[in-house]
Structures are given as C-alpha cells and as structure tokens.
Image (cartoon, coloured by chain):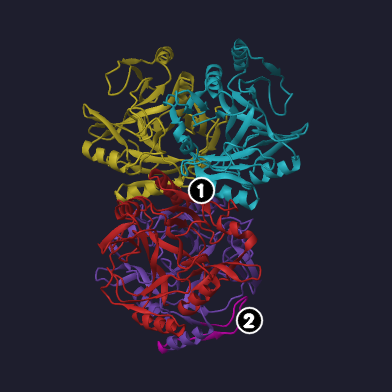
Chain colours: A red, B purple, C yellow, D cyan
Amino acid sequence: MGVFKTGYVQLRVTDLDAAVNYYGNVLGLVETGREDGKVYFKCWDEHDHHSIIIRQADGPGLDQFGFKTESPEDLAVFEKKLEAKGIKVSRTSAGEKLGQGEAISFEDRGGHRVEIYYKMQKVGNGLPLDNPDPYPPNLKGIAAPRLDHLLITSPNAAEDLEFYRDVFGFRLTEQVVDPTGAPIAVWMERSHTPHDLAIIPGKPGGFHHVAFYVENWTEIGRAADILAMNNVKIDAGPTRHGITRGHTIYFFDPFGNRNETFTGGYVPDIDNPPITWTLDKFWTGVFYWDRTEQGSFTEVYT
Amino acid sequence: MGVFKTGYVQLRVTDLDAAVNYYGNVLGLVETGREDGKVYFKCWDEHDHHSIIIRQADGPGLDQFGFKTESPEDLAVFEKKLEAKGIKVSRTSAGEKLGQGEAISFEDRGGHRVEIYYKMQKVGNGLPLDNPDPYPPNLKGIAAPRLDHLLITSPNAAEDLEFYRDVFGFRLTEQVVDPTGAPIAVWMERSHTPHDLAIIPGKPGGFHHVAFYVENWTEIGRAADILAMNNVKIDAGPTRHGITRGHTIYFFDPFGNRNETFTGGYVPDIDNPPITWTLDKFWTGVFYWDRTEQGSFTEVYT
Amino acid sequence: MGVFKTGYVQLRVTDLDAAVNYYGNVLGLVETGREDGKVYFKCWDEHDHHSIIIRQADGPGLDQFGFKTESPEDLAVFEKKLEAKGIKVSRTSAGEKLGQGEAISFEDRGGHRVEIYYKMQKVGNGLPLDNPDPYPPNLKGIAAPRLDHLLITSPNAAEDLEFYRDVFGFRLTEQVVDPTGAPIAVWMERSHTPHDLAIIPGKPGGFHHVAFYVENWTEIGRAADILAMNNVKIDAGPTRHGITRGHTIYFFDPFGNRNETFTGGYVPDIDNPPITWTLDKFWTGVFYWDRTEQGSFTEVYT
Amino acid sequence: MGVFKTGYVQLRVTDLDAAVNYYGNVLGLVETGREDGKVYFKCWDEHDHHSIIIRQADGPGLDQFGFKTESPEDLAVFEKKLEAKGIKVSRTSAGEKLGQGEAISFEDRGGHRVEIYYKMQKVGNGLPLDNPDPYPPNLKGIAAPRLDHLLITSPNAAEDLEFYRDVFGFRLTEQVVDPTGAPIAVWMERSHTPHDLAIIPGKPGGFHHVAFYVENWTEIGRAADILAMNNVKIDAGPTRHGITRGHTIYFFDPFGNRNETFTGGYVPDIDNPPITWTLDKFWTGVFYWDRTEQGSFTEVYT
C-alpha cells in the first residue's frame, strides 16, 4: 500500500508552556514525550507515539510533516523514486527521534520538508485492546480523536500533484482549475478520506493549516464553545466546505499557526472521479454557505 | 491495492414490487436497471452502477456478494491464489451482468458465493463533477449514501479469517475469541473502516445482515422514524455496538433479510492492533448499552 | 400564573452513599445540602436549591413531589380549593425544610403526597449573572440541565386529570382513552412543555419515573454511553415516544427507581388541542419506533 | 395568563411571487390563505391559521405583529391599561382579518404597530389529533416548526421594557446595560423561552429580524445547506449567541427582511433572575464564538 496516512506535523511555537496548555488542554491532545525543546503529542484515538510535534522557535510555521508507509522496504523504493527525480534524500536512523524508527526525508517541489517512516512506537489509545469502551474517561477539551490532514502552500500545485501522484500514489480527489483547466489547488488522499494533503497557491514551504478530525457537526459546535471559553481566535466557521463537503472551524493557535477541526466529508472510493471547482466558484468551494471569503483564508499563512 | 471495498450484495426477495418500494422509497436507494428478474440499486453517493441487487426467488437470503479490486491484473492474481488453495474459480465475461465488467467468482470456505470485479459502469452520484452541492435534491427515505459492510455466518470464522487475509489481504480489526483465544467471530477491512466483511458462527452460506452507512447518530434517529412510519420491523436499536463503536439499527426488509443502518466507528489505520472481545463480554460487544441480546441477533439468519 | 413547574421529587433509596455517587456522578446533579438522612440535589441549570431529594429508607419509591407556584397568595387560594374538595391540607413553615419557604401539602386523589411552595433559596446555576458562558466548566456525567417531569400511577387517571385541572389549572396535552373515550392515562402541563406531570393506571401512590431534560438526541446517545460505562441498567431506549414526540432512555437508579433522560417534544401553546391515543396504538404512543412494549414499562413501578 | 406568545408577524415584500417561493419553499412555511395583496403562512407545527403575513409593498419592513392572549376578557383589560398610559387603542372586528377573531391594536412606545387577539382559526398541524406521527410527510425546505420571536429597534428599550412589563407582564430574561446600569437592549418572554420579543437601540418602528425555531444544531446546519442551495444571503452564522445561549443563522429574505433560524437556549423559569451583559461584552453576547460583529447586525434594519 505504501504511504497510508499523514502521520505527523511538526510546528514552530514561540512559547512552549503556552503551547502545551493550548495543544494539551484546549485541543485535548495527549502529551507523550519531551526532548530537545520539542513536545510530542498524539490525538487520543491514535495508537502511534505522536502526530503533532511542537518546537520552540522564533516564530510560527511548519517545520516538516511525515507520511507513514506500510513496510520497511518502502523507504528504499521511495528513495530511488525521489532520487530519480533529482531530489536529495536524507536518512534518519531509528532512535534519532523520539518514538520513531528509521526514516527518509526530503524537500518536496514546493519547499516543504517531508519525512517517510514506517515504524513508530505504539502507545495505545487509552483503551484496553480487550473489551474496550468506545472512548476513555477524562478526555480533555476538544479531544480530537485523530489528525486528519494538512494544507500547505506552494508556487505550483499542478507540479506538486504530479509529484505526489508519481512518487507516493496520492489520488486527486478535488481540484481548483484555472480557465485553461490547469489545477491551481489540489486535494489528495491515500486513506479513503477526502484529503490527507492539500496544496493551494502560495509561497514555497508555506503552511496554511493542520486539521484535526472531530466526530460530527455537534462536536464542531462543542469545539467552538471550547475555543471561545479559552479565548482562542476563530478565523472562520463553524461552516461547511464545498470542497470535501466537510464541516469546519478555522482558528489559530496562540502563535498564529492555523488549526482546523474538520468532520464529515464523503468516503471516496479509490476510483472515484475527481471533482473540479472553477475559479468563479472558488469561494463556494471553500465556504459553501457564505460563498465569499471568511476570515483570513487567503491572507494569513505561516 | 487489490480489493478495496465490498462492492455489492445480491439478495433474494419474494415480491419484486414490494422490494422495489422498500429498497427504493424506504431505504432510498437509486434504481439503476432491471434485467432477468433482478433489480439493480445503488446508494446515492456511490458512483458505480450498483451496490444492491435484488432477485425474485422463493425465499429470502444472500445469493452472492462482490468485492471491487483495483486493476484488471488482480483477477488473474486472485485466480491463481484461489486455485492454489484448491478453490474452483469461474470467469464471468464483461456484459454478462448489467453494468459490470469481467469478473471471477468462487465459493468461499464458509459456503458463500463471492465475485471479484474491477470494472463497473460509472453512473455518478447525482451531482455534477464540477462545483457540486454537498448532496442532490430530492433524496428519498433514509437515503443512505453508501453500502457499508456485510455480516455473514460460517461454521469456522478462524479459517475464514485466514482465507480472506491470505488471498485478499483483509486486515482483522476485531474478533471474539473462545477461552483458548481462538477467533470465533471476526471483523475485517480493506477500506480504512472498522469492517467491510464480518463473519459470525452459523450455518454455511448464511447471511446475517447488510449495512448501509448513514452520516451520524442524528441520521440514525431519522432512519428509525422513517422505518416506523413505513411499518418496517425494527429488530434492535437504535443502539451502539461495542465492536466497531458504531451506532446502529437492525431491521428487516419485508422478506426477512436483515438490514442495518450503521454510522460512526473509528477510522482504523492499517497497522492498528486488532481488538479482542472475550465471550463473557460478547453482548457488550454487540449491544454496548444494554449488554444483553436485543431482538433476534443470534436467532434469525437467512 | 399559579403553579408553573414540577419543582422537586423526593425519592427513597436504600444506600445513601451509593445514591450520592449515582445522582451526583452519573446523572451529574449538583449536591446542595444534607439534613436528617436526606441529600438535596439540583440540576446544573436550575437556580433553586433543589429538584431531587433522596432519603434513606428501607426500599425505593416516591415520598412526595412539589409544585412551585408564583406567589405567596397562591398557597391560601389552593388551600381553599383543596379543602372545598374535602382534601386535608397541612402547612409547612419556612425553615422546616432545607432551602425552602412555607408550603402546603396534601395527598392527591391517587394517593401521592404533593407539596406547593412559592419560595426556594436561589443558589444559582454555576454561571455569573453578568456575561455568562453558555455552561459552566466541570460538568459531570450526564449533566442534565433540569428536571423535566414526573410519571406516577393511580387507580383513576380521569379523576386525577379533573382534579389537577380544577385545582391547579393543568392543561391536558395528551391522553390514552378506553373504547368509550374515557381517559385512562393523561399528560398535563403548566410550563409550555408536553408534560410536567403524567399519570398512568396503576396502584395508588405509585411511581413510574422521574425525567431529566437533556439537550437533544445527541445527548441521549451520550447519556447511554455514560449509563453503560457506569453499569447502570437500561430499561428501554434510546428510543422515541409517540406521546410527546420526545426522545428517551428509561433506566433504573441502583435501588430500582426508574429514571428517564428526555428531550425534544413539541412546545405546546396553551390552547393547543389535546392529542388522543387509542388503546390499540398504546405501544406506538409509548415506544414509537418499536410499537411494542420495551423493557418493563407496565411491570415495574415503585 | 394573558399574552402567551408572539403570534404573528406581518412583513412587507416587493414581489409577492418571489416571497411565496421563499417563505413557502425555502423556509418551508405552509400557505393558508390570500386576501387583499397579502399571503398568510403558518409554520408546520402551529395549529393557528397564520404566524407570518406578507404584504405587497414598495419596500421591506415590519407592518405589525400580534400577541395571542388567553381569553376574550383580556382585550378589555389591556385596552384599559393602554388607555391609562395615554395610548390610543383601535378595535378590529372578527372577520376583518383572515382567520382571526376580534382584536385590539395600538402603537407601542417604540413606534411599532401591535395587535392583541385571543382567537384564531385552528387549521391544525398536518397531523391527526388521534395517534399522530411525530411529523407529517412532505415537509419542505427548512420546515421550521414554529415562529419563535421578534427583534425590533426602538429609541428607548428601557422605557419599552417598563411598558411591556407593566401592560402585558413580560418578564425580562436578559439585558444589555450601559455603564450606569440602565438597560439599552432587552429580551423579554411570556412563553417559558428565552425571548418572545427583544428590543435593541435603533430607529422607531424598526425591524431587526423575525426568528423561526428549528429543532437543534443539526437542523441549523441543514438550514444553512438549504439557504446556500437556494442562493439566500447569509448574514451571520451558523453561530451561537451568548444572550439566550441559542444557536442561530441570520439571513435575508429576497427583499432585505432579516430572518433567523434559532434553536436551543435555556428553558427559563418565570422567577429566574435576569442576565445582564455589559457593553464591553456586547459582541460576546450577540456572537459568542467570534466575540466581534459578524455580518451587518448593527447596520442593517428595515
């Protein structure tokens, strides 16, 4: 199968204590370790050691993200494919990173640092593997059960699509096209969801948001309450996307990294035809109900 | 990827007109064709020609079900694997079945007729591929967006698990084990859902239920209203499963075939550890809230 | 306005510690005081001192319940009306009961002890009266925001209806009638809800259940999870009533007193025509989805 | 009891056909009659002949609204009270208005035409009074079950509060106060809901919005879908109010009259203490999640 999920996202924050409070108590992630100025978190229903890493830095933004792949052999396969495209690949040994096995990493065409790994320590989801309840007691805050996807910016989404399709087998689910029909923003998946990774036009290496899955529209409303009670700045929503059909809130962590709670969306078969949005319907695609820009969608990246 | 979903289920019914009303107006499936005493349906958000076939017969029950596989080459691969296990494989030519390309079929260890196909006519989900609304107008009845899974009975689920794992790569998500730890009921997936196919102990070739996905617990409640307004017999629920965590209603079509509306459940990574239920917690696994048998779960199969 | 709500219900329990855990942690009521072998609770969004009193006794059951009335003058008015019907009325002085002002009490025609009071200590709902959040942090368990209604048994609901209508102005919202059209079960309200008090046929002084309001069907599902996680025996549901249209779970406190979580139902105008259920549709009225008896509805009272 | 609900609202529209489509098919009201350039509608779960009247006119805005009162005698009582305050009262005979009995009308202090009536033709809610289903088949559009409340503008909400309290017994549930503690916006009720009538500062006779009740937050989301699919301009939301705690969408009919779908909010006892919002928290009161102005709340009235 190769890559089967967006496994983790590493973000820069300017105050580790404030970040631990925000990611731990407001989003309700589970802290799993600290090392070298980084704090590791997982969503409660994930079994792997981490899906969010925050790193103390001078400003917000995306350090890198990782895809989990099925088998050890995949690393060499992807390494070869990447090098065939003239992309320099680095190796990380097992043990270099907390909870993670050996990995390769590279800079994608759009200027983002990407890591591929196949092994991560299993720390469990807080439930026994025998006769579990549907969720553990004492969940905190929004209590998102899992990382959903990542939206990044890049100067050329069409090339990025080709790259991610060729090398990792990502499937295009939705795209915004220019009047010639060329894709200028793309949504891609490897996990039977509307997107694991999406790319919109913008600066190289840019980060738009990381999204956390919540169970349904009711949880979106509850998330909004929790954000408000914690004075978190909501950027847009609760609302619905046309693209993916999902329900959403965009909001910012205390440092300016945009986060999303996301739910719904269809379950795409791997052979579903992709959906195309024309530029005149771009805002309907992004904010289905309002059909105009909400918040700072096109203005604020980190 | 090989098999990536349970694609269709063919059921026997004793009155085709009553069945068309039930599957079309109550469940709200979309009729896509009729041929040779069979009526073909799809769920509204499916793009393929059919996911439910009903066939006029003398009594209820399961005729066969089909898995969709990724590529034409898969057929020969699976044919070889099946024959290596001493299983007789038949070929169906493209055009023999409405809307479906060439396929192989065989009888599984538990006595069920199974078909593998890679091509089915794309009829669309009622929405344009450009700038679609999230759902089409004029949905009817329960309006389940897609087929979810199938639960069948077999004399030896442990052997079936081995078979489906070896041949098609199904992953075990949950199991009920006997005191020796041997699986006696199994839940397996290929689509990042808690199950595409499940097997419980029972007669060879037996059929327990076919499940239709609905969006959330609110839709489960709405489905119950629609069932009641149409005098459909509810077998159990609305309730929650321990196994899969999903919310459910079991009910019967007018001929005695058990149907389910199912929602929720986790999104399993392909490397999640399987969950085990011990026999003393069996009913907690099946009906998490009541923890006792509800309706005719263990009594009525077709 | 006179009587404007069912204000409190006093129940007998056989183990005060177990009861405090159940009513406090599972239902999530707020304890407001203890006195003389009684523990006082309120639902979180109620401002008055108590809505549930539990009393240590030899067996379960209903001690009494109270209606809150608008003004001090009402007590004398009701006293006169009751005495005109030959009913003996007792006076309780302010201070005799925790948090409660002066009151009258009497035994109704069906053998239930009923108290009428107009003053109760305001203890607040855990939120400031200036610029409140929509709910306080740290709610526990089911966290029902308010007491909803009471269902009692009596040998003659038709007479009871007349009594509660004449003396307190209760409005009939729904009734079950026998083939002659005489009411044999009645639902009555004073608070623009489908019912504050309902009476079904049964022994004098009998208690069927006390209901706690929850916000919606999603909260009903969450309540079922919490009940199951706490090994509380569910009697019936989650399901929907035909009568009142509300969604419900019936379950038992550890001593056998039936509780309900209730939501939904219409908002009746005071001049809405009452709804009538005929005996052949009785179970559709009680359990709209299943249309048959569920649990022990007609069998277990305390 | 006197006045027990905001019974109807009469709005001006500039195109009766477009209005019939909007109020009938998008909001899903039930048309009950036409007369003299007016079309009468009710919400589906209301039993009375009308709750919305639209009148062909040169521009949008509020003509008048009506309160329903309990008994014929109330008209004379209110007439006397109004005249004692120097307010001129008109009488309308039964039969002058479609479906409505005799009434009195007057202009309130804030310049709004208000009618008090006790009788309106009962046309039913589309369900039988015997053994009804919870809702009728074939509901259309948003299908709001009932009119909820009205928000108007006036130069002096403090005086209006005193007026509505003295004459009709409205209870203050929430208020915004200026730094001296004087109310500058008020929410008042007579129906055990957070508000039947609210007044914010603005021009005399001004109309801010009329609100339709929907069942829950899920229905708010569905309403937003329907608005978008029908190209209705959303002004703000889906979001939550701090004031009333309710969930809401503001949007405009095709002529510029603001409508709201509203749900939730607490069930206030008649003796609940009122809630006060200070000016610095005004936007938290109006839009709890964003805490800033959304849409045109303070800018657009009709």
Res B173 label: none
- In the rendered view, would you say B36 is above or below B140? below
Residue placed furthest toward the top: D84
Seen at 63% across and 40% down, the residue is D126
Tag 2, which chain? B
Q: Quadrant of residue A23?
A: bottom left
* Element on which disc 2 rests: loop
Prevailing secondary structure of the magenta residues: loop
- In the rendered view, would you say A145 is above or below A67? above
Tag 1, which chain? D
Q: Amino acid at mark 2?
A: Gly
Horizontal side of B94 relative to A88 (left or right) equals right
The residue that mark 1 highlights is: D218
Labels 2 and 1 share a subunit: no
Provide residue A228's location: percent of width, then percent of height: 42, 44
Horizontal side of B62 relative to B155 (left or right) equals right
Q: Is residue C158 magenta?
A: no
* Mark count: 2
Mark 2 is surrounded, within 10 Å at the Cα level, by few (under 14), some (14 to 19) or many (20 or more) other residues, namely few
The residue that mark 2 highlights is: B95
Residue C237 in view in this figure: no
Distance of label 2 from label 1 (alpha carbons) = 44 Å
Frontmost residue, B53 versus A231: A231
Q: Amino acid at mark 1?
A: Thr
Q: Is residue B96 magenta?
A: yes
The boundaries of the magenta stretch are B84-104
